[in-house]
Amino acid sequence: MKKMMKRANEFVVKQAIKARLAVSNNKGEGYIDTAVKILIAVVLGALLLAGLYALFGDVVMPTLVQRIRNMFNYAG
């Protein structure tokens, strides 16, 4: 019976030490840090896509349409 009590006591002490180490461990990321990083990535991605859309809509597409019309304009 004493062996069982000693093993149970050792188990509880080991678990307490593991719990103390887990609680005092401050490395790693928190949920808020990850959420902020994701939010920044989404905002930057949206800005990049908006800039590309504006560039293609105003600069690239009209030039491309004009070049295609010139390419297939056999009369002129």
Image: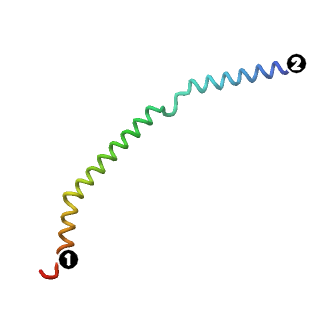
Residue at image location 16% in from the left, 82% down from the top: 74
Mark 1 neighbour class, 10 Å CA radius: few under 14, some 14 to 19, many 20 or more: few
Q: Residue at x 72, y 21 (%)?
A: 12
The residue most toward the left is 76
| Left or right: 14 as drawn, with respect to 33 | right
Q: Is residue 75 left or right of residue 61?
A: left
Percent position of residue 73, x then y: 16, 78
Q: Identify the image quadrant of residue 64.
A: bottom left
Residue 29 place in picture, x, y as percent: 49, 34
Q: Earlier in the sequence, mark 1 or mark 2?
A: 2
State the residue at coordinates (23%, 53%).
Answer: 54
Q: Note whether 36 is above or below 69 in the view shown.
A: above
The residue pinned by badge 1 equals 71
Which residue type carries mark 1?
Met
For badge 2, the amino acid type reads Met
Structural distance between the alpha carbons of marks 1 and 2: 97 Å
**Residue 16 spot, x, y in % from top left:** 67, 21
Q: Residues within 10 Å of mark 2 (few under 14, many from 20)?
A: few
Quadrant in the picture for the N terminus? top right
Residue 76 x, y percent position in the rendering: 12, 80
The residue tagged 2 is 1
